[in-house]
Image (tube, coloured by chain):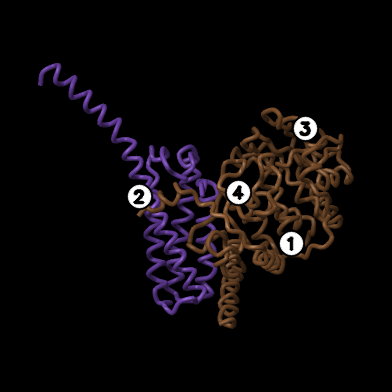
Chain colours: A purple, B brown
Amino acid sequence: MTFEKSILAAIVAVSAMAFTAPALADGEIKYRQAVMKSIGGHMGAISGIIKKGTANRANLVTHAQGMADLAGIAATVFPEGSDFGETEALPAIWEKPEDFKKAVKMFEDAASAFNMAAKSDDMAQIGPAFGNLAKTCKNCHENFREKKQ
Amino acid sequence: MGCDVRLRTALATGLAGAVLAFAPAQGSAQSPADPGEYVFNLAGCVGCHTDKKNNGKRLAGGRAFKTDYGTFFSPNITPDPDTGIGDWSYEDFSKAMREGLSPEGHSYFPAFPYTSYTHITDADLMAMWDYLKVQAPVVQANRDHDLQAPFGWRWLMVFWNMLYFERGPATDWDRGRYVTEALAHCHECHTPRNALGGYDLDKAYAGTKRNPEGITVPNITPDRETGVGKWKTGDFELLFTIGMLPDGDFVGGVMGESVSHSTSKMTPSDRAAMIRYLQSLEPVENDVKTKKTQDSEDNAW
């Protein structure tokens, strides 16, 4: 490669990076929002079942498993650089990574505890476990997310 | 049908009850032994008067509120005599809460919701004062508000109060309205304001696309399309006890704080009274969802 060509290549590479970085952040944000909606979907379904608003009570274990699985990937949907764009995620996530890590860990633990409770099929365990799980949802939304609407 | 609705409501309420009864940190839902602490909690004082984001000390103030008028900083309300309210008398406290005036007679700005607290009864105010004056004192000097003219001119507040402030306490309110408006001060955010910051009472509780802090506040009147008219009593219960919305989402921000500090600490009967009051409001059609939000929601799929 000639000198001129490598300069050109460098220019192209740098420009490409400049364009793909925001696009990538955008993709990360969209993906994160979809994951969060899935989590919210399961939570809505679970409360519907616990409220006995549906005959599909047996599906509780499926939603509980879904929550445990999604909680397991929650930490991965906030990569560095995905704070720039149409997001409700607060800078605190990246500014106080230790606090955020702790909050996500609480969510993971509560989701697996709820999963265990759901498998027991015992309402005396399911109710409080759901309450604890809900608390971890609210905890993050209070400290790390600013609802824009 | 009516029976069915009642049954579902009872079950949903039961769920919130079951969840609450077992969730340890929320165990304070029973009326605390101290009536002052109870009123203090419901009025949500700790949220604004604690700079949680910067690990500020409890009730020592310093929390910033960025608004269209400038930035307000909440004051220290711990009993420190120099930087807090340790040298106040009950009369000073009552004047602040009921009239929005400092001990020296200066007007407070309505970022402090005295327009709601003015309706707190004497008995509740006294209990609150007894509680407040035994909290841990913190030495922390107040920060001056950073406001744009003419909003920073305190003397103008005299006219503002003439226009928009109705001194309480109102005597004909039932318990639900009292809990909702005097204590939990839901009005303050959920009723839109005019350009001068006065309530637009024709749209009471109908929310706004953009409040003075730049935040969208939802319509909580029973309008079926743009408000919460489709909500069941159990939906309100879940929101006010654990912060969950009917779609499985969880509130955060200021509403999250309200749930943590105030609504989750209400006695079941006070919470029920508040819900009944909200359900009895005049439905107002006011769509606060911005076009952009709807678009981005569509795109998310």
Q: Do the residues labelled 3 and 4 touch (CB within 8 Å)?
A: no
Residue type at numbered disc 4:
Val
Residue type at numbered disc 3:
Arg
Q: Distance between the residues labelled 3 and 4?
A: 26 Å
Q: How far apart are marks 1 and 4 (CA)?
A: 21 Å
* Rendered position, B50 above or below A141: above
Q: In the rendered structure, find residue B154 and report the number of the disc placed on it.
A: 3
Q: Mark 1 points at which residue?
A: B177
Q: Position of residue B100 (x, y in %)?
A: 80, 42
Q: Do the residues labelled 1 and 4 touch (CB within 8 Å)?
A: no
Tell me if I can see residue B186 in this picture: no
Q: In this view, does B208 lie to the left or right of B134?
A: left
Structural crowding at the residue carrying mark 1, measured as other residues with C-alpha within 10 Å and reported as few (<14), some (14–19) or many (≥20): some
Per the image, label 4 sits on a secondary structure element best described as helix
Per the image, label 2 sits on a secondary structure element best described as helix
Per the image, label 1 sits on a secondary structure element best described as helix
Quick one: quadrant of the C terminus of chain B?
bottom left
Q: Distance between the residues labelled 3 and 1?
A: 30 Å
Q: Mark 2 points at which residue?
A: A31
User: Is there one chain holding both mark 3 and mark 1?
Assistant: yes
Q: Name the residue under label 4.
A: B254
Residue type at numbered disc 1:
Arg
Q: Where is residue B196 in the image (x, y as percent from the top left)?
A: 69, 39
Q: How many labels does the image show?
A: 4
Q: Mark 4 lies on which chain?
A: B
Q: Position of residue B269 (x, y in %)?
A: 71, 69
Nearest to viewer (mark 1 / mark 2): 1
Say whether disc 3 or disc 4 marks the residue closer to the N-terminus. 3
Say whether disc 3 or disc 1 marks the residue closer to the N-terminus. 3
Q: How far apart are marks 3 and 2 (CA)?
A: 48 Å
**Front residue of B17 and A26:** A26
